[in-house]
Amino acid sequence: MPAGSAPELLSMLPDGQGVRVARLAADDFWNNDSAPERFCVFNAERELLHCSPDLSMIDGGVLPETQRGQNTIISEWRIGEVDYLLGFWRARCLPTLNSPGFIVMVATPKAEALQDLSRYREAFVAAVLLACALAAGLAIGQIRRQMQPLERLQDSTRRLSAGDLQARANISGKDEFAQLGRAFDQMAERLAQRFHMLGLLSELDRVILGSSERLALISTLLRDIHRAVPCDGVGLVVFNADGEGKLFSELAEGKGEALCGETVVRVSDLPEFPESEGVRVMPPGTLPQAMLDALFRRPVAQLLVFPAHLKSRLDSLLLLAYATPPQNLDEIAQSGRSLADRLSIAAANIAREQMLYDQAHFDALTQLPNRLLLRDRTEQAIVHADRTETSVALLFIDLDGFKQVNDSLGHTQGDILLVEYGARLRQRMRQGDTVARMGGDEFVVLIPDLARDTAYATVDRIARALNEALAEPFQLGEQHLVSPASIGIALYPDNASSHEELLKMADAAMYESKRRAPGGYCFFTSNISELTRDRFELTQDLRDAIQRRELLLHYQPKVDARSGRLAGAEALLRWQSPKRGLVSPGVFVHLLDEMGLSIWLGEWVLDQACAQMHAWDQQGYPPFPVSINFSPLQFERTPVLARVQAALDQYRLQPDRLELEILESMAASESPTVRENLVRLRALGVRIALDDFGTGFSSLVHLTQVPADILKLDRVFTRSLCTETRQREIVELIISMAKVMHLTVVAEGVENEDQRELLPRMGCDLLQGYLVGRPIAPDEFAARWLAAGPSEETSAAWTGWQGPSDARMR
């Protein structure tokens, strides 16, 4: 088909009648100038078939070679002076048409085509920016939503680390952040509880160390326990030594403590709580309902009970109440146990402080106030007396003959007697009076609030009643013992202006009472003060005498009752004072006992006597035994056997040269220490003599068991021996009894010829007294008795008396 011609369509006529030719009216077919598109149509050989008017200037009317057979867009194609964008479309015909088809080219001016693209580019940039902004906003919002819980956690962590135990994240929701927040809050809650627990334990320790008041500890515990231990209610039961418990609960506001009225529970009403049990989980029905009603205001479903013990005794119970069973039971149990331990420590601390106070202020034996507490109460009474213009009386009481009680019955019975004395004094005094023990056998009664115009009469009546009460027999085991007391009385402000003076004046009056008539009472007067001053000066001089070695021994001879020959000597203490002259022991020995020097004195006498015997031996005098006195304290508190053995060894003396004189009461003592020492000394060869026989409290049964060799008949028997028939018969019986027990009898206080003549006939072995010889210094004794024998007068007195002395005395 020629270029520009219209397309033709050939078809066969039926039955071969010919060919039908149809030609397309090209001008009408292609022309559509009203269409907005600009296009050209080419045949398969790229020959132009039709173009829009604007494209009529296509060069040669031929489609470019590069675009053949392609559906594409040529971005840059210049037609004339105008740049076009061309689009090609190859339209294929059906096979039945037997045509290769044609090519349609659509041309759009480049400027016109790209005009929408520029607007799109502008809109695209804006859209991209908007999208980016939107995405950024959404991302920021999402990040912010995710960072907010983290920021809360971070802030709460920072506050918690800074010490804010109330810091919580409080993150709601179900995501991971909410779970993390809840875990943090639980951790912070437990951490806060532990910090509060440590703080509570620290505060309890401070209260325990700083106060002996249990109420302070209870208040602190009940006030702060809720912050340290989760619970719905707290109660505390504190028991005394009698098993009675007082109930304490928290106040309505959860602060402090409150005593639950008069409600009291006993240990016997509760289940047993062993000391090894730290905590017990129990239903409320196990405990008395009245106790639960007093302690808790809300219904209780479960109780945790923590017992605290003191020396195996239930001291207190800490109760934690719960409306629902707690989850973290182990942690609560550990915390409650720590608090119960503090209660035990506090109870032990209070008991220890009370014990220390009692030890410092009360006598351990009688449980009476001691010297320290008496001083405090006396000073308070004096202050009160000044304010109320009343008087205060102080009664100083000393037992008469208490030393003999200890010596004869033993210190155990003596202690029992002191306890009975204290009890009897308490029973006789008023509730506001103070009965105190000063030590030993000395008691003091303080009587305050006495009307000044009737003070003397009132105290006189009280003292008389006390004398009568104390003179009544005491029951010591199977024995009845009468041991009266001497009482000295001083009044404030009449006799003294202070506690020290009041005590001093009462003490002086007591000694004056003993001097006048033991077992009575005496008010302080001015002349007693002079006696007290003399006694004080004597004590000071005696202390100086010991330092200056003014004490010495004199020796009194003991002779055979038949021949008058020297059989031994007794060493007697003397004080050669430059100011007082030669002082006898009766004046100052009791002061040495009060000064606590009785043991020292006994050991000094032992050493001096052994040293003197050694000196006489060195001078060539014939040996003879020397007797010395030993106090009960030496047998009780010193190694007597070792001391005696050491002295004998040091001065190279045979044991039978030494005689130890002990009181009859001490020899009959039931003390195993005394008896053992006596047996060992006698086994060593030392001779034991019973001094002042017949004046003690011993029984014949005791005397038959005493490990002794010598019996010394007291001077009270020899004094009236020749004038009283009954006394003579008693002496004969004593001597007969001594012979039965194979004891050598020594009669003391022989002062006249009648006694010297009668005693040997009665069986007495040795005589001692002023008739025989007075105690004299060692040199004089040696010159009179050792160098030249007895004096002519003494020898003549024994003329006609024949027979050797007892073989044991030779």
Image (cartoon, grey):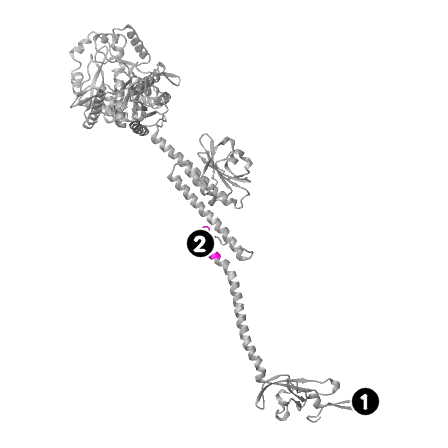
Does the image show residue 484? no
Identify the image quadrant of the C terminus: top left
The residue pinned by badge 1 equals 13
Is residue 156 one of those drawn in magenta?
Answer: yes
Labelled pair 2, 1 in contact (Cβ < 8 Å): no
User: What main secondary structure does the magenta stretch of the protein show?
Assistant: helix
Q: Secondary structure at mark 1?
A: loop
Going from the N terminus, do you reach mark 2 or mark 1 first?
A: 1
The residue pinned by badge 2 equals 159
Residue 67 is situated, as x and y percent measured from the top left of the image, at 62, 87
Residue 641 is situated, as x and y percent measured from the top left of the image, at 30, 25
Give the number of the disc on residue 85: none
Residue closest to the eye, 595 or 429: 429
Per the rendered image, the range of residues in magenta is 152-167
The amino acid type of the residue labelled 2 equals Arg
Residue closest to the eye, 341 or 45: 45
Residue 104 is situated, as x and y percent measured from the top left of the image, at 66, 86
Q: CA distance from mark 2 to mark 1?
A: 105 Å
Does the image show residue 203? yes
Q: Tag 1: Cα neighbours inside 10 Å, few (<14), some, or many (≥20)?
A: few
Q: Tag 2: Cα neighbours inside 10 Å, few (<14), some, or many (≥20)?
A: some
